[in-house]
Image (cartoon, helix red, strand yellow):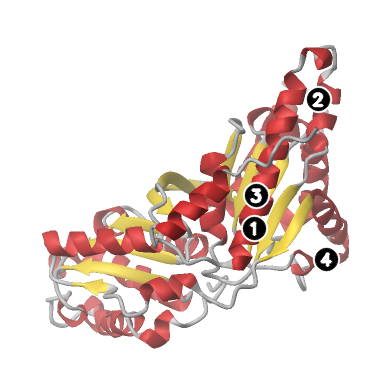
Amino acid sequence: MELPVNRALGARYDALVAAGEISEDPVQREAVHHLDVLNTRLAETRLASKKSSLGWLFAKKKNQLWSSVDGLYMWGGVGRGKTMLMDLFYEVTVIHRKRRVHFHEFMANVHERIHEHRQAHKRGEVKGDDPIPPVSAQIAEETRLLLFDEFSVTDIADAMILGRLFTQLFDLGVIVVATSNVDPDLLYKDGLNRQLFLPFIKQLKSKTKVLHLDSTTDYRLEKLAGAPVYISPLGDDADSQMGVLWAKLTHGIKPHAEELENKGRKIPVTCTAADAARFTFDELCMQPLGASDYLRIAHAYGTVFLDHVPVMSRARRNEAKRFIILIDTLYDNGIKLVVSAEAEPQNLYEAEGGTEAFEFDRTASRLIEMRSEEYLAGERREMQS
């Protein structure tokens, strides 16, 4: 007799609809059902793997038990609620060994592990010159459920190892849930040696249920449309407005912290949920960050909240320069921006003359455009450099 479907996610979704945090959406509702079914399968498999009658099984047999569970690949346009649903699933799933990570961060970590294994092999510390089996084993030991946000493949180095890596992970009983803007059949489209990548696509589709979130509504735009996304001056009222809009855009989901990987360095993100991230001016413009760091942020989140932007003078030219680069990067990638600032855009930089003053004129113009309905309704421009 089958266990009833665990409706933990369905109950959370119902509560959000009832509270007016989100609108009832039949496409999202179907995804919720499939995620609840998956959670039920995970609960059943965990129970089966612990039964005394199965206690004699070797680890290989247990992995085969988990390998019978298929994950989920949810794809669709921006603002359709994919990340929100995955965040909610992460909260309610019965699995404890779980990891939620941007796909780019995951692959950066994989390359780092491969490098470490090769170095250890050179030193004679490990046997075997193929790093994929031990790296896969490490990941499987740490994680039973991998939740990928923004699954996309553009790098040939990633493309060439994905097939072997995930063959091993799936065999070791790792289950994958992923969100993406891309139909799996179009992953790594026009990539170099793509024919070598096609077996991975076939494998991915065989180990996940592919679900197209084809809702006609961009809910992120719906939340931001008509809202003041540039709030000035600073103060308690501005902080309150920022908090209300953040809660509205993220549907009240509890935010979490994570780190973004960029060229071997870590970018701390202390507050993120539902494809949005929240930073202070100090975190982004008073730290030694550069254009590639801001580009990494733009690739990771569709909406950026930036709190407490001060008026800048020549004495703060370094911070002003970083702010200019940050805004340029977000603008060029079509990222939605919500700001609280000490003054209106044209009054944020006080110095007359100099390179920063000239460049800030363009920044002010872009800040004004980025709060327009036309910009907020625009498409996100992927992978601009």
Identify residue type, mark 1: Ala
Kindly report the distance in space between the C-alpha atoms of the residues bearing marks 1 and 3: 6 Å
* Badge 4 or badge 3: first in the primary sequence: 3
Residue receiving disc 3: 35
* Badge 3 or badge 2: first in the primary sequence: 3
Residue at the image point whose x is 41% and y is 77% from the top: 331
Residue receiving disc 2: 62
Task: Mark yes or no: residue 130 visible.
Answer: no
Residue receiving disc 1: 31
Identify residue type, mark 4: Arg
Residue 340, given in percent of the width and then of the height, sits at 22, 66
| Vertical position of residue 246 compared to residue 264: above or below | below
Camera-near label (4 vs 1) is: 1
Mark 3 element type: helix
CB-based contact (under 8 Å), mark 1 and mark 3: yes
The disc label shown at residue 194, or none: 4
Q: Quadrant of residue 356?
A: bottom left
